[in-house]
Image (tube, rainbow, N blue to C red):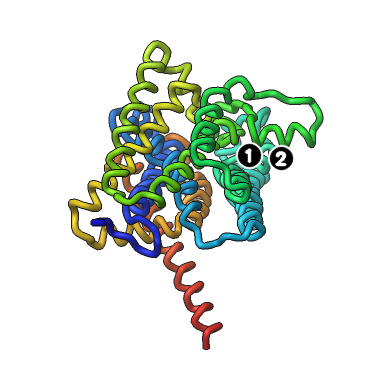
């Protein structure tokens, strides 16, 4: 097979994830700092798109894909990792949300005057459901799926059902605080509509679980393939087919099907699922056609350090609001901030990697 691999991980997968890291930082910077004119411009729309299907859906799909290639086989460590990532989401909420929110109100900063205090308070910010909470739950679900050896076609069909049926579950609650807290993780829907905080439940399990389940199917298919080049071509064709179905379904009412992105309905979900699979094929073509270079090496580092960078960029971005305000920045300022936040996040990841390696070396000695 003419396929490049590294530590059992296909390099095209790392390329797609590395690009998603940059798109993620870019779109978060745009949403927090760009003026309305910049956000509505062609530049803003391009960044919004790159921070859409090629970002979070790619992360989640590749989480499922990589899960199949994981060397860990026991159920307990996989569940423990899921719990750890789930809880880390609330640690991040404290560092990037609760602390700066409390300080801005206590110090009576200008930013506090524009916050919708009728919708935002310390508890609301602490309990925001973001991608880390979802990723932790998804990892635990995937661990159980793998433990019970569920057929890959059943997994794929489950992904399809979730993407189709989720809208009928959103917002269902029992008015019992503890139970509702759990239900919100799975299908909560609490619009806030303030700048970059569109919905308190940004990544509900339904419909986002569709992506890691699809990733598991792709991973199982690729792992058992005797010709990965052909398999990738089938992925590409299948992705285009599903993408076009999503476009056809959404065409009559785009706003309805794409909703608030985090709660995309049937057409939007099919479009994003199809796009992600086709995007992986495009990344495979790039890896095949372009020789290894320093830029690829950088993206591979970002791919491996995605959790570190996710933490770093959000904390840097939110704390920088005190300096740059919300939705006030020009084109030049936004581009400069994207580059600056990317560079700082990169060096933070490098520092963490260096310390981990030094600790490992000291243990060996």
Label 2 neighbour load within 10 Å: few <14, some 14-19, many 20+:
few
Query: Count the marks: how many?
Result: 2
Residue 274 is situated, as x and y percent measured from the top left of the image, at: 37, 32
- Residue 203 in sight from this viewpoint: yes
Instruction: List the residue tagged with mark 1.
Output: 128
Task: Tell me, yes or no, whether the two marked residues, 2 and 1, touch with CB atoms within 8 Å.
Answer: no
Q: Reply above or below: 136 against 36.
A: below
Residue 313, position as x, y percentages in the image: 47, 51
Q: Residue furthest front?
A: 226
Residue identifier under label 2: 123
Q: Residue at x 32, y 44 (%)?
A: 231
Residue 136 in view here = no
Residue at the far top in the pictured view: 252
Q: Secondary structure at mark 2?
A: helix
Give how far across and how far down residue 363 sits, in percent.
Answer: 55, 83
Residue located 48% across and 52% down the image: 68
Marked residue nearer the N-terminal end (2 or 1): 2
Q: In this rendering, would 120 be left or right of 312? A: right
């Amino acid at each position: 097979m003419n396929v490049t691999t590294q530590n059992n991980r296909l390099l095209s997968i790392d390329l797609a994830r590395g690009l998603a890291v940059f798109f993620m930082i870019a779109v978060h910077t745009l949403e927090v700092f760009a003026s309305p004119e910049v956000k509505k411009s062609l530049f803003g729309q391009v960044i919004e798109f790159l921070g859409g299907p090629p970002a979070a859906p790619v992360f989640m799909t590749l989480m499922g894909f990589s899960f199949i290639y994981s060397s860990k086989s026991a159920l307990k460590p996989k569940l423990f990792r899921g719990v750890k990532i789930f809880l880390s989401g609330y640690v991040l909420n404290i560092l990037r949300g609760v602390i700066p929110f409390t300080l801005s109100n206590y110090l009576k900063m200008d930013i506090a005057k524009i916050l919708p205090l009728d919708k935002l308070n310390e508890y609301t910010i602490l309990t925001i459901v973001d991608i880390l909470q979802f990723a932790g739950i998804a990892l635990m679900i995937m661990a159980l799926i793998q433990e019970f050896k569920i057929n890959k076609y059943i997994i794929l069909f489950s992904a399809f059902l979730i993407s189709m049926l989720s809208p009928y579950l959103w917002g269902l609650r029992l008015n019992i605080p503890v139970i509702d807290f759990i239900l919100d993780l799975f299908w909560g829907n609490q619009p806030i509509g303030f700048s970059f905080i569109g919905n308190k439940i940004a990544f509900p399990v339904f419909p986002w679980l569709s992506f890691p389940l699809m990733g598991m199917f792709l991973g199982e298919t690729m792992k058992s393939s005797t010709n990965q080049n052909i398999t990738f071509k089938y992925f590409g064709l299948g992705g285009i087919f599903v993408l076009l179905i999503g476009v056809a379904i959404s065409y009559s009412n785009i706003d309805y099907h794409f909703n608030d992105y985090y709660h995309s309905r049937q057409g939007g979900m099919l479009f994003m699922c199809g796009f992600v699979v086709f995007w992986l094929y495009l990344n495979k073509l790039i890896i095949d056609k372009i020789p290894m270079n320093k830029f690829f090496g950088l993206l591979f580092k970002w791919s491996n350090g995605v959790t570190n960078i996710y933490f770093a960029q959000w904390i840097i971005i939110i704390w920088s609001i005190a300096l740059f305000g919300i939705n006030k920045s020009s084109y030049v300022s936004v581009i400069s901030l994207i580059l600056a936040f990317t560079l700082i996040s990169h060096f933070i990841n490098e520092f963490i990697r260096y310390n981990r390696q030094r600790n490992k070396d000291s243990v060996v000695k």
